[in-house]
Image (cartoon, helix red, strand yellow):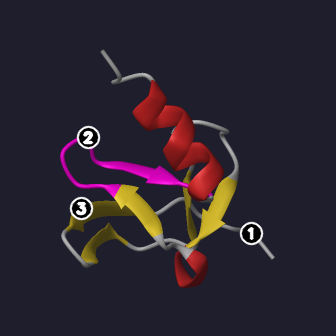
Amino acid sequence: MNKKKAKVIFKHNSFDVVEQGDYVVCAISGKEIMLKDLSYWNVELQEAYFSPKEVKKRYQNFKI
């Protein structure tokens, strides 16, 4: 089965699929995230994250 990368717009508490596909890519780890499993993203940066571990890594970069 061929998987296709989706294009999405992240909103607060939801996301819109702009281009149909099966997955998005984690901005930190590069892992594929199936849309049905997508739970973590950043609206301002428009990035998806595989798990809370990647979210933590991203936010550590913003600490002053």
Q: Looking at the picture, how far across and down is residue 39, in whole percent?
A: 48, 73
Which residue in the rendered view is the most extreme toward the bottom? 36
Pair 1/3: label in front: 3
Q: Is residue 31 left or right of residue 35?
A: right
Q: Looking at the picture, how far across and down is residue 42, in whole percent?
A: 31, 52
- The amino acid type found where label 2 is placed reads Leu
Q: Which disc number belongs to residue 63? A: none
Query: Which label's residue is closer to the chain start, 1 or 3?
Result: 1
Q: Which disc number belongs to residue 45? A: 2
Q: Is residue 53 left or right of residue 58?
A: right
In the image, residue 33 sits, relative to residue 62, either above or below, namely below
Number of residues whose C-alpha sits closer than 10 Å to that of mark 3, classed few (under 14), some (14–19) or many (20 or more): few
In the image, residue 12 sits, relative to residue 26, either above or below, namely below
Query: Which label's residue is closer to the chain start, 2 or 1?
Result: 1
In the image, residue 39 sits, relative to residue 59, either above or below, namely below
Q: Looking at the picture, how far across and down is residue 44, in whole percent?
A: 18, 45
CB contact under 8 Å: marks 2 and 3: no
CB contact under 8 Å: marks 1 and 3: no
Q: Looking at the picture, how far across and down is residue 29, in whole percent?
A: 67, 39
- The amino acid type found where label 1 is placed reads Asn
Q: Which quarter of the figure is the N terminus placed in?
A: bottom right
Residue at numbered disc 1: 2
Q: Which residues are magenta?
A: 42-50
